[in-house]
């Protein structure tokens, strides 16, 4: 197991400690009361939606693998093992996928890393698109800025020599790898693939927004779907921009405050936020750890 693969454990411990603090600072009796009347069939549907989104992302990952001419029997395990790093700051730890492909199939990291970059590009653009469609004018301007910045950054990485020149100045020995990565990045930066990435990302994030909407309804409360999409998208982006592990604290805090501002009772807002994070962030980490364990067993 690589050192990178061991990193999630410290973040998981941090997460457990953070949620322990939430319980200590909240009205536990009130929280348990609302959880006792929750319609858990809604949680099951929410989890099904989130998992469906994961399967769509797996299809997209395999699409990237074909675009990069990478053939591996471990594609699904590698993809889901990357989820173990969801709790790292801005999901940057998901570069683990490139290390695992190197370990299982001797595929150079410079060859597979563009697929991971495209996934992060999809995260930012998909969430930004949802924000543009659901927010007020000021929110739309911010979201449009992130969308445009992401597209320009991708084009600069793939179509210019800027990254190569910077690395050549700072770390001359790494310039060859950057050149190789740029060549592979070019294979994915096409109008067709960018459009496919944007659409699939928006759809999969929309499923997680629907999970929030369903969970709120499970408490007998209600918010309209547009509000649910806005709250989930904005709080997720806020968490990513904080560069805290898994957005811990920022995502939870912003989601809770936005739910309260949408006229939910504080105890229901808190319970809804906890269940949403359970079936998004922590479900992903759980699946990732299982997949990472299975991957390590498969290469022994």
Image: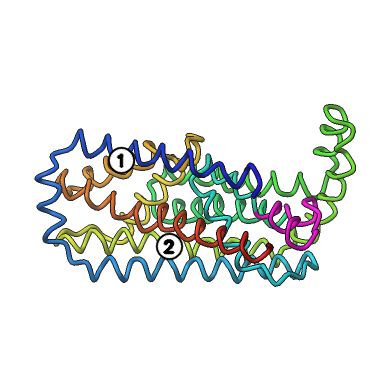
Query: Total marks drawn?
Result: 2
Check disc 2: other Cα within 10 Å, few if <14, some if 14-19, many if 20+.
Answer: many
Check the image and name the residue furthest to the top.
170
Tell me whether circle 1 and circle 2 mark residues in contact (CB < 8 Å): no
Q: Looking at the picture, how far across and down is residue 288, in whole percent?
A: 51, 57
Asked whether 99 falls inside the magenta stretch, the response is yes
* Mark 1–mark 2 distance (CA, rounded to whole Å): 25 Å
Where residue 161 sits, quadrant-wise, is top right
Where residue 299 sits, quadrant-wise, is bottom right
Which type of secondary structure does the marked residue at label 1 adopt? Answer: helix
Check the image and name the residue furthest to the front.
300
Give the extent of the magenta segment: 97-113
Give the number of the mark in front: 1 or 2.
1
Residue that numbered label 1 is attached to: 19
Asked whether 128 falls inside the magenta stretch, the response is no
Q: Looking at the picture, how far across and down is residue 144, in whole percent?
A: 53, 46
Answer left or right for 166 relative to 219.
right
Check disc 1: other Cα within 10 Å, few if <14, some if 14-19, many if 20+.
Answer: some
Residue 206 is labelled as: 2
Q: Residue at x 42, y 50 (%)?
A: 233
Q: Looking at the picture, how far across and down is residue 206, in whole percent?
A: 43, 62
How are the residues colored?
Answer: rainbow
Q: Residue at x 37, y 59 (%)?
A: 209
Where residue 21 sits, quadrant-wise, is top left
Name the foreground residue: 88 vs 250: 88
Q: Main secondary structure of the magenta part?
A: helix
Image quadrant in which the C terminus is located = bottom right
Name the foreground residue: 151 vs 47: 47
Q: Residue at x 57, y 44 (%)?
A: 6
Which type of secondary structure does the marked residue at label 2 adopt? Answer: helix
Q: Looking at the picture, how far across and down is residue 162, in whole percent?
A: 82, 38
Answer left or right for 186 relative to 261.
right
């Amino acid at each position: 197991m690589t050192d990178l693969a061991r990193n999630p454990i410290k973040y998981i411990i941090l997460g457990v400690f953070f949620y322990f603090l939430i319980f200590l600072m909240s009205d536990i009796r009130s929280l348990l009361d609302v959880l006792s009347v929750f319609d858990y069939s809604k949680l099951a549907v929410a989890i099904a939606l989130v998992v469906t989104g994961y399967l769509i992302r797996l299809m997209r990952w395999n699409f990237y693998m074909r675009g990069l001419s990478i053939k591996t029997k471990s594609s699904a395990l590698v993809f889901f093992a990357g989820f173990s790093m969801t709790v790292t700051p801005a999901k940057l730890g998901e570069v683990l996928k490139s290390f695992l492909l190197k370990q299982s199939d001797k595929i150079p990291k410079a060859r597979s890393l563009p697929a991971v970059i495209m996934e992060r590009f999809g995260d930012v653009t998909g969430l930004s698109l949802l924000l543009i469609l659901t927010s007020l004018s000021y929110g739309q301007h911010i979201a449009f800025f992130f969308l445009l910045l992401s597209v320009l950054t991708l084009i600069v990485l793939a179509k210019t020599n800027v990254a190569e020149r910077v690395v050549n100045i700072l770390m001359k020995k790494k310039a060859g790898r950057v050149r190789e990565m740029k060549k592979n990045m070019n294979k994915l930066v096409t109008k067709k693939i960018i459009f496919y990435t944007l659409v699939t990302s928006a759809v999969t994030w929309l499923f997680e927004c629907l999970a929030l909407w369903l969970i709120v309804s499970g408490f007998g409360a209600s918010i309209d779907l547009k509000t649910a999409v806005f709250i989930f998208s904005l709080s997720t982006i806020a968490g990513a921009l904080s560069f805290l592990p898994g957005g811990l604290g920022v995502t939870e805090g912003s989601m809770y405050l936005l739910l309260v501002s949408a006229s939910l009772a504080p105890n229901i807002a808190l319970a809804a936020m906890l269940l949403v994070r359970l079936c998004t962030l922590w479900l992903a980490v759980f699946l990732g750890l299982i997949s990472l364990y299975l991957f390590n067993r498969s290469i022994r």
